[in-house]
Image: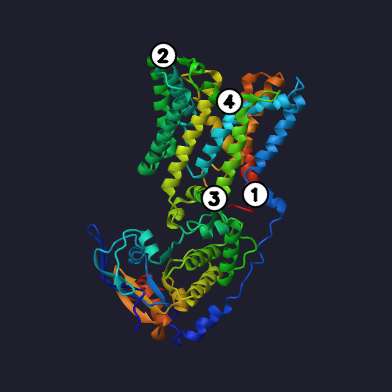
Amino acid sequence: MVGWSHPIHHRISFEERYQTAIMSTPTQTDERMKQASPFIKLLRRPEFGAFLGAIAIYALFTSVDTTGNFGNLSGMAGWTDIAAPIGIVGIAVSLLMIAGEFDLSSGVMVGTTGLIIGMLVTNVGLGIWPAIGIAFAFAACVGLLNGYMVVRTKLPSFIVTLATFFILKGANMAFTMMVTGSVRVTGTDQASGFQSAYNLFATDFGSQGFQITLIWWIAITIIATWVLTRTRFGNWTFASGGDANAARNAGVPVNRTKIMLFVYTSMSSALVGTMFVLRLKGMQAGQGVGQEFYYIIAAAVGGTLLTGGAGSAIGASIGAAIMGMAYIGIPYALWNSDWTSTFLGLILFSAVFINTYIGRRARGGSK
Amino acid sequence: MSTAALELVNVGKQFGSVIALREMTVKVDPGAITCILGDNGAGKSTLIKILSGVHKPSSGRFLMEGQEVDFSSPRDAMAAGIATVFQDLATIPLMSVWRNFFLGNELQKGVGPFKWLDVKRMKAVTKDQLLQMGIDLRDTNQPIGTLSGGERQAVAIARAVHFGAKVLILDEPTSALGVRQSGVVLKYVLAAKERGVSVVFITHNPHHAALVGDRFYLLNRGRLANTYERETLHLEELTKAMAGGAELEALKHEIGR
């Protein structure tokens, strides 16, 4: 019996409880909490590692450059031309990844929307603007369907959008063959309204030949950063990917947030598809396939967590810039450009490794 | 006698052929702390899920301030002023303290469709509200995952109180915590009561319950086993009942020490 019965009946008085509890509720700071220095706070930023990496890669390609052009404006016009379309979709993919989902159909959608525009103007005879409108509407529907299927079936978005990817890849080829009898659509520059659309989406500016896509890219980076960090929708994006259950308990419409991000991602692809079909004045049936990985690389190199809950828009843009520099820098250095993908693979691994390592150190432990 | 903040009258809950709760009559007094105690499988989680609107009772009546209610979702319960702080599902680790505090209730400014977060005000309110609950954070910008488990629970409690919860349901808030951290959380439970909130405190720790509770319901195998009032509570009795009473004696005998 010893140990379970107390010699004196322990009656808990009201006063006693209040003395132990509420009276001793003075504010307390935990003396064990370290004050984070501004430098540590900077290291904690997810895109910081990518930023350092971009500087290092810029320095590398400037030093091995054989043309003397990499570091100047014309070199910049070159690598931003590659980076801009990757960045435009990469930002959307990054936001979607922050919300905890993938979109593997984001690459093929560039081709699909470009082909839709091409076929609508050359084979149906629509003006370029209505064709662009229809392409965007189609992309929005596919995004809606991707998102709806993911939240309703609760299947991994990796699988759902992989299915969408293959469905569209096949349809792109089959439809193009059926309608044009070849694997490409051409002659979009004959459409009415072509010039005005070209001026908005595909023209260049300045004597160095900067592409207008650069302006779009910068504008989207700024807007997406603002939305992500300074609006309720951005807050919900982080919450949906951070912990969907906790977010739901707090009243966040997690499903709606995710669906909207799927729609946004598809429409980003449509924007890039529009840019390509106007610039190239046509579209290959296989265009865009494989690009989805470039978008994911841009997001991951930029510090977006693959498991969701953390990341940034500017990080994805830095990741896209690194890719652009590699694509221009390698031939400028007279290296064999067959190795470009290998180089990007190494960059991806080291960036994510270093980001994770720095992040863990900066947070001071295991979390 | 004042009307109960929440009241269950003869409530039962069945899942298929499993009877999770039967003849449960529970009264949550306004501005008091009502403790629900019980071992695993006693029906505690089914009971809170009914109170927080996750499940509907199969039989019996559910009253809020004397009016019969019929919640079809946690959202309904939340709108009526019942806030539930779930043990692990309360906060988002990678988001900052102030973002967690205002999640789902963000303060905005701006015009028409162009609205943005009023970050400055949210940070100030978060700091102020946490201070009132007795938590002083240097930086509400730090990810909430960097806080201790007790502090995270405290933020979740402060959030519920700030957003006008009349009834606060706490699901095992101390079960994953050490002694010191549990003490911290218990203080915030009392602080919430001081601010006029009715608290339902679910726990399997009789010592924690006894420190703060006003009334104690002991559940066993889906039934109400016993009810104690603060004035007549013997901690020893409660502890013994919780530990299994006679079953424990039998176990002691069996082990033979």
At label 4, which amino acid type do we have?
Asn
The answer to whether the residue labelled 2 contacts the one labelled 4, judged by CB atoms less than 8 Å apart, is no
- Going from N to C along the chain, the mark reached first, 2 or 1, is 1
Tell me, for residue A231, which label it has, or none.
3
Residue A195 percent coordinates (x, y): 55, 22
Q: Which residue is mark 2?
A: A180
Q: Residue at x 59, y 52 (%)?
A: A366
Pointer 4 and pointer 3 on the same chain: yes
Mark 4, other Cα within 10 Å: few <14 / some 14–19 / many ≥20: few
Q: Which residue is mark 4?
A: A199
At label 3, which amino acid type do we have?
Thr
Extreme-top residue of the structure = A181
Give the spatial CA distance, label 2 vs label 3. Answer: 45 Å
Question: Which callout, 2 or 4, points to the residue nearer the camera?
Answer: 4
At label 1, which amino acid type do we have?
Arg
Please name whichever residue, B164 or A352, is drawn nearer the observer in this view of the structure: B164
Give the spatial CA distance, label 4 vs label 3. Answer: 32 Å
Q: Which residue is mark 1?
A: A44
> Vertically, is B52 above or below B36?
above
Q: Identify the chain of the residue marked 2, using the numbered disc in the image.
A: A
Question: Which secondary structure lies at badge 2?
Answer: helix
> Vertically, is A77 above or below A11?
above
Residue A234 percent coordinates (x, y): 53, 48
Give the spatial CA distance, label 2 vs label 1. Answer: 53 Å
Question: Which secondary structure lies at badge 3?
Answer: loop
Mark 1, other Cα within 10 Å: few <14 / some 14–19 / many ≥20: some
The answer to whether the residue labelled 1 contacts the one labelled 3, judged by CB atoms less than 8 Å apart, is no
